[in-house]
Each structure stands twice: as C-alpha cells, then as structure tokens.
Amino acid sequence: MNFDDLIPNSDKTHHLYEGVPIYERRFKNIGPFKFPGLAVACDAAGACHITFAGEPAYAERYDWTGDFAEGVAAVRDASGRYFYIDQTGKPIAYDTYLYATDFAEGSAVVYHETFGATHITTAGELLYGDWYFDARPFANGVAAVRDENGWLVIDAAGTVIGRAEEPAEKFPLRGNVRYVPQENQIPKVLQTADWDAAAVLMRHGERQPFIKGEPGSTKVLTARGRRQAREFGAALPDVPIRAYASPMVRCVQTGNEILAGAGVAKEAEESLMLGTPSAYVADDELVREFYVINPVKIMSLRYVAGETLPGHYPVDVGTRRMFDFVSGTLADGEISVCITHDAWIVPFVSLLTGYDFTNDWPGFLDGCVLMRRDGKYFLWWRGREYPIAR
C-alpha cells in the first residue's frame, strides 16, 4: 500500500482504501496523504493534519494548513500569520510571516512585513541571505525575484542569472518593502570611539544554510561570507589585531579571513569558550542534541528569560564566564576579535544591556564591542554604549 491507495471519498469527509473507510471519524474536509503519512483535515475545531488512523497528529488547530512537503508544512493561525511546523506539530523556527508557500526543491517563499520576500530552507533559514520585494518558488533550479529595477532570475545560491519578465503566475500579494543590509558599523566604531583596549564579540560570517536533518557543524562560509569577513578586517583600525574563534570551521574561517583582510599573517586561535561548547555550556553532548531538535531563536529567548535549558549553565553564570573570557583578551592599544555564534551573543548582550531580541537577531558578522576606558568597561551595541559594572 502507498499513499496513492488512500483516497478521499467523494465528499472529502474521510479516506478510503479499496473503497472501504480506513477510520470511523468524519471531517468537514480532507486532503490527500503526503509523506510522512499525514493529511490535511478540518473539523469543527479548525484545521490540522491527521494520521492513517484519522487521529490528529498534534493538539493545535489552525485557520488553514498546507500539505506536508519535504518534512514540513505551512500553517496559518487565527491571527493570519503563516509559519511552518514539523510532523509533531512543533514550529521549525521562531519567525512568522504575512504569507508562505509549500516547499518545493528544498525551499519555500515567505513574505515578511518588515523585510520583504525571500526563500527559506526546511530549517527556517534564509536560503541565500537576500530579501526582495517579491519572490516566486524555485522550479528547475531557478526562481524569479523582484528588486528595485524589476524582475530577476536567481539560482539557489542567490546568484543573479539575468533579468526577466514578470511571472504570469498570480500571487496573493505584491510586496512593497525590501530590506537591504546597512554597512557594518563595528569597524567605524573602533575607528572613532575612545578606548584603551577593545574586544569584538561577533557572529561568524555568512555560512551555508541549515537544512532540516543535516548536521549544522559541517556548514562552512559561503564565497560572499569569506569576502565580507576579509572586507571587515580591511576596515579595522591600523593597530595590533588578534582573533579568537569557536572551533567550528565557519568561525575559524571567519577569524582567518578577518586577519588576512587586516594584513595580519597569523591564524585565529581556537577557544572552547566561544563554542563547541562555549562559556554557556556545561554539557556539550547534551546541548548538541538539544539544538538538533529545537530552534535556536526560540530556545535562546527562553534562556534569556531565565528558563533552565538542558546542558546549559544558568544564563547569568554563562554570561559572567563569557565576560571573563572576552575581557581577558583585552590589551592596551590592541583589538581582539572573538568569533562565536548567535546563540551566545544573544544572552551576553541581553543580560548586560537589557536588549530585547524578540524582533531583532544578530546577523552574520554582527556583534558587540567591549571597550576598556580609564579602567572602566563599556559595551557598544546597536549604536549605544552601555556602562558595565564588573
């Protein structure tokens, strides 16, 4: 028996196998079964997905549910927001959208009211790192997107292949916003701020996107990520520069590219305080398993709020450990660059400044600057200096 053998009956209230109902329950409406063996169904409580036994796969109900494709499904909640769930009903990421399509060829189109339209992976990450006014699903390895000058065709890496006509396919909405990243402010801060010693705690450069079911530890910098890291290094002040990095390959690559851009003929020094595990982690193996099945942003926000997470130190203890490490790299007249991960920048900045990351998240090469001035410590973040009591 395969999924095609289980067909909706004529009024789409239940499924049949060889003309016989496969369960007793009746629904207002159903769809076909899709891998991994779930079908869209709607009852008096709302829309969900059901199993072969006609039972809901999870407790939640939605205004609308899409078919499962590539292990995830789009849903729309009562407020009209779209997001994606896995087969257990758990959201694959924190973000929600104005609109979202089903997955095809490893990606889906999403529209966000602040950033615009783009493609995401089955792990809920940007496929290629750019936003557009509009986007259409990939087909045969290419997709149409719209920028300020009209429609383009791009490949899965986000590389522009050429200009294109507007797609004939009608879409439910037309975008009117597009987020374009601003110039990285950290080099300018280090050029203009008054400091005796400075240390940057930053996220690694742009890496290959995470895909559901694939290990994230193997992801390396993209060509753009390497170029941007080198440009970051070239923009730093002409002072002695050292780099420390999480042992994760993308962090080490980032540190080495920054040093090369700054003209420093050295490599980044690996530190377990920055990752694998990190200053926040008491049990590395437990934490690795935890983040395989739990979205980083959702868990990080809970961690900052004081929730105890498996394998983690209490958030205040972890922040003290990270502060001690970063401040320990300070040297008069020099800059140290510490490359880590978004999961550790968020609690560090949040606890030291009170910053709310709910609607903001550290991007690639994004970070804070710890400065020592006249024996006192200050943390620069998002255009503001915060005095730090040690």
Image: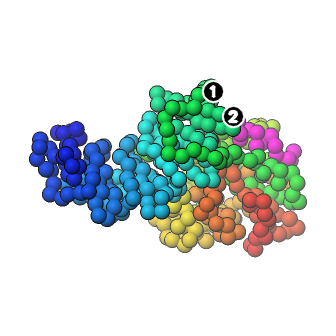
Picture colour scheme: rainbow
The picture quadrant where one finds residue 200 is: bottom right
Measured as percent of width and height from the top left, residue 168 is found at 51, 32
In this rendering, the answer to whether 18 lies above or below 383 is: above
* Viewer-closest of 185 and 65: 65
Q: Quadrant of the N terminus?
A: top left
Amino acid type of the residue that numbered disc 1 sits on in the rendered structure: Arg
Q: Residue 344: where, in percent of width, then height?
A: 61, 59
How far across and how far down the image is residue 151, in percent?
61, 32
Residue drawn at (77%, 42%) of the image: 233
**Circle 1 residue:** 163
Disc 2 vs disc 1: Cβ atoms closer than 8 Å? yes
User: Is residue 193 at all visible to an observer of this figure?
Assistant: yes
Residue 218 at x, y percent in the picture:
52, 41
**Residue, far top:** 162
Per the rendered image, the range of residues in magenta is 227-240
Looking at the rendered structure, which numbered label has been put on residue 149?
2
- Disc 1 crowd rating (10 Å Cα; few below 14, some 14-19, many 20+) is some
Check residue 53 for magenta coloring: no
* Kind of residue at badge 2: Asn
